[in-house]
Amino acid sequence: MKKILAIFLIIEEWLWDLLTAFGRSLFQWLNLEHFEQWLRQTDPTMALVAFSIPILIVAPINIVAFVLIAKGMILQGILMEVLAKLLGTLLVARVFALTKPQLLTFDFLNTIYTTITRWLHWAHGKVTDTTVYRWMKQLRV
């Protein structure tokens, strides 16, 4: 089981790095540097609104994916979920990165962030000691 989790973790890391770089390039290409600067400096309430918008875009895609899978359209549902994951990583993660200090002033978000971060560190520690993870990490370099 650890080997499978190690494979998923390294693929997730690869995708995260790739999509983060793509998101940064896309924002530059779309000339959104001023918007990014505004997001970095906005107040916590506006940061929460800005963070909610990409979530509201991605959530319906997740629901459609679930409905497709429930109706037996497994491949279409999986593809829709992959789209949601890619958009989520691209949009939600980018806005979160830009507004993180403001968002963490909200106790509920700080608690969620701390809990998820703690769990991810625990999970990461469980799989990084596997041979599969070390081997795939070497492939990445």
Image (cartoon, rainbow, N blue to C red):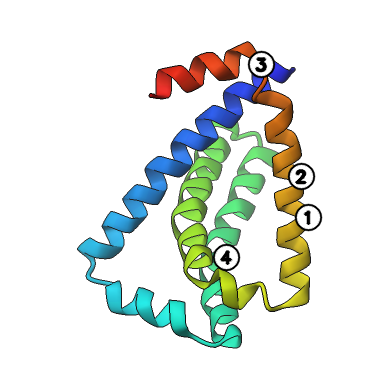
* Side (left or right) of 59 relative to 83: right
Estimate the x, y position of residue 130 in percent, counting from the top left.
66, 16
The residues bearing labels 3 and 4 have C-alpha atoms spaced at a distance of 34 Å
Instruction: Mark 2 or mark 4: name the one nearer the start of the chain.
Output: 4
Crowding at mark 3 (Cα within 10 Å: few <14, some 14-19, many 20+): some
In this picture, residue 36 sits left or right of residue 51: left
Q: Position of residue 63 (x, y in %)?
A: 64, 54
Name the residue carrying label 4: 55
Within 10 Å of disc 1 (Cα), the crowding (few <14, some 14-19, many 20+) is: few
- Disc 4 marks a residue whose amino acid type is Ile
Which residue is denoted by mark 2 in the rendering?
Answer: 119
Q: How far apart in space, not on screen, are marks 4 and 1 (Cα)?
A: 19 Å
> Which picture quadrant has residue 72?
top right
Mark 4 or mark 1: which comes first in sequence? 4
Seen at 71% across and 78% down, the residue is 106
Instruction: Identify residue for label 3.
Output: 130
Residue 21 position within the rendered picture, expressed as x and y whole percent measured from the top left: 34, 49
Where disc 4 sits, the SS reads helix
Q: How many marks?
A: 4
Residue at position x 38%, y 41% in the image: 18
Quadrant that contains the N terminus: top right
